[in-house]
Image (spheres, rainbow, N blue to C red):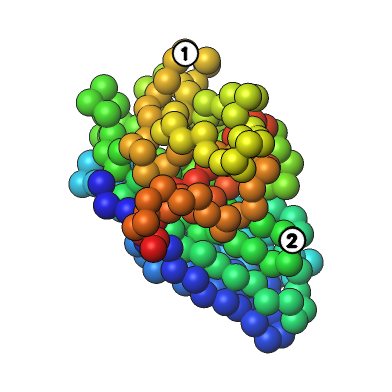
Amino acid sequence: MPNAIITQTTLSGNINNVSFVNALRDALISVGYTSFDTFLVGSAEHRILALNSSSAAKGTVYLQISCNSSFNTGYQLHESWNTSPTARGGTNSTINVGIGGFAAGTTAVTFYSVNHPEAKLVTIEQGTSQSVVGVIRPKGIAPSWWNENDFAYAFQTKYNTNPPSSRLAGTTSPSGNNAFDYEYMQFSKMQDGNPRNNDARSIFPLCILSAGASGILESCNDLIVTASNTMRIRDTIPVSDKEIYTYIWGNALSSGIAIRTTGG
């Protein structure tokens, strides 16, 4: 598979919840999402974005992002979305992930947009606050046993500053679980880099575990790998003179996540 493409945009000036949520929406649009709905509840600005990954009946999912005037920010995934003002809402929705640390004011916010068939993500940084919003789709296509006409094959990143929430979430699955949290395979011995050469690579493909601890659901290609959780977002791991792994996900229990990009 080709390497992922990461692009950077910055929100600066007098930042408020409207400019923040719109900038995040635009960063998600840049990696393949489309704007689907916009609405206001109290002071909370909501944006719904559709992500189409296949022609199957459940091949499109809907990502909701929100931010109110107190900068309470959250996101969740839906299997469908009704835009009617009298019945607005989603189905088979994951639990809303609240992310703290972002704030109004003049501290710039940087968005790193990750574009690849396996990953449609945006990493957000403001000062020391970080988060990752979007969807991972291992191998870019559902495995043969996963019927995408019945079950959406898309896994929402579930990331905040609390390490136990460093996991994924899905809407429905062949295992019969709705809005289930999916862990990814981690090893405590992999959480630090090699102290002899500072090599932070774990470098084994990201493996998403099935619901109910029943083995591996699917593994990614070597595009998305696990790496030391001591790295900061945007740290890089050289692979060759032309390729690097860029760290996109920290605060995991044992291992973070890096994605292969072009370097050199």
Residue at the extreme top: 214
Q: Is residue 77 above or below residue 241?
A: above
Q: Secondary structure at mark 2?
A: loop
Q: Is residue 211 left or right of residue 162?
A: left
Residue 147 visible to an observer of this rendering: yes
In the rendered image, which residue does mark 2 sit on? 128
Residue at the extreme front: 196
- Tell me what residue is drawn at x 42 percent, y 42 percent: 224
Q: Residue 155 location in percent, x, y?
A: 45, 40
Amino acid tagged 1: Ser
In the rendered image, which residue does mark 1 sit on? 214
Q: Quadrant of residue 101?
A: bottom right
Q: Earlier in the sequence, mark 2 or mark 1?
A: 2
Q: How busy is the neighbourhood of tag 2: few (under 14 within 10 Å), some, or many (20 plus)?
A: few
Q: Residue 191 location in percent, x, y?
A: 64, 33
Q: CA distance from mark 2 to mark 1?
A: 36 Å
Q: Secondary structure at mark 1?
A: loop
